Amino acid sequence: MIGSDLFVQAAVPEEDILPPPTLQYRGTKYTDDPRFKDLQAAFPAVWRRAWIRVREALGLRYQDYGPGHITLRLEDLPRRSKGADFASTGGRRGRQDIMLRAEHLLNGYSPFEEVLTHELTHAVLRHSLGNVHDRLPSWTRESLAMWVAGQGPSMTGWILGRALETENPLVQRNGPIVNGLAGHRHTGTDLVEDVLTIEFLHQTLGQEKFGRWIHALVEGTEAEPAVEQLTGMGWEDFCQKARRYVEDRLQEDLKNVHAPFRRAHQAVQEKRYEEAAGQFREITKNHPTHWAAAWCLLYESQCWFHLQKWEEALRCFKELNLSPHLTVLLFQIPGLKVKLMHTYEKLGKREEALAERERFLKDHADVPLKNDPSPPRTISLIKRTISLDGGWGRRYHRMDALAQRLALVQLHPLSDGQNHFTPKHGSWLNLIE
Ligand SMILES: [Zn+2]
């Protein structure tokens, strides 16, 4: 499976570990939330691990520019944000400001350590490279941060998982997932190839030479000539080998899960839901640490939901909540949480349902807008968010459906005790919102 730990815990000298900055919270929603208190308590240890990982992966010593040279703040999502970045880092040499969204850290979208490591990678690189950091080629900058943060598996699982039911998940609606590093418009789906190319470069060079590549960037050599110098391969040659490596890695990753997933999916299409649920469960059992397990749990939960077997559906939702790969479901998460509310409701657990609803309104401020009398506004907001991310037609369709349903939930409060929310099972696509 993709996601083996690439970094050996070598000793990083204590003086190279920057003490954690103050974690500033510029928001109000979570001040007394126990999840936020847990995050604060974990912060010093998370910071330290993130720092060691960045330091080891990049092989760069960080030059301290004095107090306040890295600031870290948490913010609440603004109401009516454009989906809002999960996190960002900005600044110049000598001062880097990291911003993390409180909601995304607490609502299951993004694990704290990964996000912090990702942003720290940007901060350290921009600190060393100055503005050159922002001019690195598309395949380098984000994928380097993702690779250091170990986000390759979640990116792979998010992108490939959406096409597991097709004959070849490497070919999606908008083209092949592996299509070379340049020569086309770069979109979110290119990130899998990009991040695995960094992995290939790291394997080809080894840690010491990989560090020299980063140093070459710091000294002003452009990324691609530096690859040529250090690998001894021409650029075209490198690209070809990298591409083959990426294809092999992805095929290997899909090897044991793709065929059984397709079989289970076929059962769903033939409305053999109980059988399908069993098949999805079997894949989860056989490959519990694979990212596809999260997709299987999602599909299984939908089968139970469809069959109105609420206890089973609840079990799936709870397992999903604990899944280390929950983040691969990304945009499915709000839909899942809505289903969870309704499952509680069907089970007569009114208090739990209302608690979930409250949490949803707090944690997904960018998805539905509380008491918004205008569902179309919510929909256009979501569309705008999605179009920023590459404009996937199918995703649009799904998000539309989701937005409408969420608006529905908003307009008909749970407290009326009625079965106001009955999913239409016209097609599987509608079911997996
Ligand atoms: Zn980034």
Image: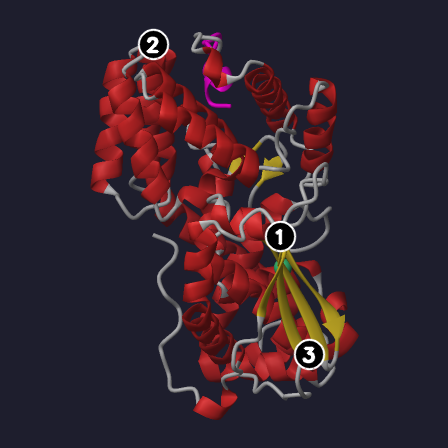
Q: Earlier in the sequence, mark 1 or mark 3?
A: 3
Around disc 3, counting alpha carbons within 10 Å, would you say few (fewer than 14), some (14 to 19), or many (20 or more)?
Answer: many
**Compared to 63, does 40 lie above or below?**
above
**Compared to 213, does 261 lie above or below?**
above
Magenta stretch containing residue 120, yes or no? no
Q: How far apart are marks 3 and 2 (CA)?
A: 56 Å
In front: 122, or 168?
Answer: 122
Residue corresponding to mark 3: 127
Q: Is residue 263 visible?
A: no
Q: Is mark 2 on a helix, strand or loop?
A: loop
Circle 2: residue type: Lys
Residue corresponding to mark 2: 271
Q: What's the magenta region?
A: 422-433
141 with respect to 325 (left or right):
right
Q: Is residue 382 visible?
A: yes
Ligand 1 within 8 angstroms of badge 3 C-beta: no
In front: 71, or 32?
Answer: 32
Residue 99, horizontal then vertical, whole percent: 65, 60
114 with respect to 232 (left or right):
left
Q: Identify the residue shown where x is 44% and y is 7%.
A: 418
